[in-house]
Image (cartoon, rainbow, N blue to C red):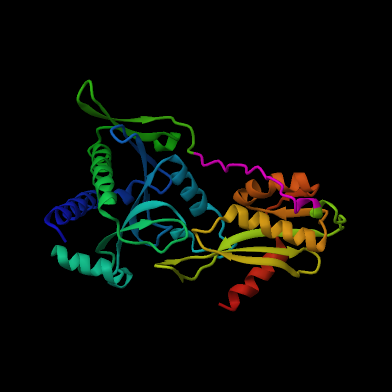
Amino acid sequence: MTGKLRTKWLRLYECAARIGALDPWEIFGEADKFLYRWKAKEKDLFFSFIAESAGRFGIACYDGEANYARARRRLTARNDKQEPTFVLQDAYICLWGNREDLSRPTYELIKELGLSFRGKGAWLYFQRYETGYEPVLPGERDLDLMIEAFGNLYMMVRAVREDLLDPQFDRGFTLTRWYDPKARLYYTHPFRTPEPKAPEKVVKFRPDPRFDDLLKTPVRSSVWELDWSYMPTLTRDDDRYVFPRIVLCVDQDSGLVLFHEMLAPADDAVNAVADDLCAAMTELGRPASIALCDDGLKAIVEDLCLKAGVKLTVKKRLPALNAARDELLKML
């Protein structure tokens, strides 16, 4: 480790430790929104003081509104799919955990930095989360972002702790910090801001010559249930460990699995789902309806179903598919 990199790591540990010393979890909940507008990098950095979702104290930093919104939506929703929910986010996270929570690279880093922790919930460590992948140590560029982010978060928390301002979280406000280059000053103030969103982009399906064969198939009276979910187990994919995502399509009446495919995070999920669905309809005939419950999946297949003349319905639960998935998970 170079001296420059060591200095960055120690600065980051110092920033997080100073925030932790203010015991923010005593007064803030996971839903309380913090925002730092980093104009120099044209970034909006959101923060959440996590506790119950991680089973330990921590701080999550999200680069951008969409990453924050996706994480909060997933962490607060019912986990009917038995997914490894907490790791399915794009974030920079520090946690106060136990010795057994640390990966070998993290433990070796702490030793190399000359840091010492004792007791349960005292081991401070940092991870870079990327949806579908095993969390890893942050890289040097990640450290630059986290030092800037956590340094400004500390100032926000301190302002509240010292009774300098009321964040007004109970009124739905977002505590926001920014730098004014004209005044050469940082400002921190609560604002009523729109709820962060991460809209799913609707995919426009482009038929190829094979689609003509699909349109010639009869429309059956059957209903198919379609869903995807991340498996709760790690597998090796090239040089990284991943949580693969399985795509399942099940006949609602019989419970028969019509097709399934396992996708790695780097796979082209859009084309894989569209190809699988087209192939199944060409071989088995078009169903009268396809039921699903996932917004992301709906965005992928909505235009395809429209062009194929298949009704698309959104439901809260998919009983036949859930039963098939439960059986699959039992075999893991």
Position of residue 98 in the picture relative to residue 18 (left or right): right
Q: Main secondary structure of the magenta part?
A: loop
Residue stretch in magenta: 197-212
Residue 231 seen in the current view: yes
Residue at the extreme top = 182
Quadrant location, the C terminus? bottom right
Q: Quadrant of residue 282?
A: bottom right
Position of residue 68 in the picture relative to residue 21 (left or right): right
Q: Nearer the viewer, residue 260 or 19?
A: 260
Q: In percent of the image, x 24 and y 49: which residue is there?
A: 19
Q: In percent of the image, x 64 and y 56: which residue is there?
A: 273
Q: Nearer the viewer, residue 122 or 181?
A: 181
How far from the left and from the top, in percent, is residue 189? Answer: 32, 30
How far from the left and from the top, in percent, is residue 202? Answer: 62, 42
> Can residue 286 be found in the magenta stretch?
no
Q: Quadrant of residue 52?
A: bottom left
Q: Is residue 88 above or below residue 101?
A: above
Position of residue 323 in the picture relative to residue 114 (left or right): right
Q: In percent of the image, x 39 and y 35: which residue is there?
A: 174
How far from the left and from the top, in percent, is residue 210? Answer: 75, 54
Q: Is residue 216 above or below residue 180?
A: below
Residue 115 seen in the current view: no
Q: Nearer the viewer, residue 179 or 160?
A: 179
> Can residue 210 be found in the magenta stretch?
yes
How far from the left and from the top, in percent, is residue 13? Answer: 20, 54
Quadrant location, the N terminus? bottom left
Q: In percent of the image, x 13 and y 65: which residue is there?
A: 114
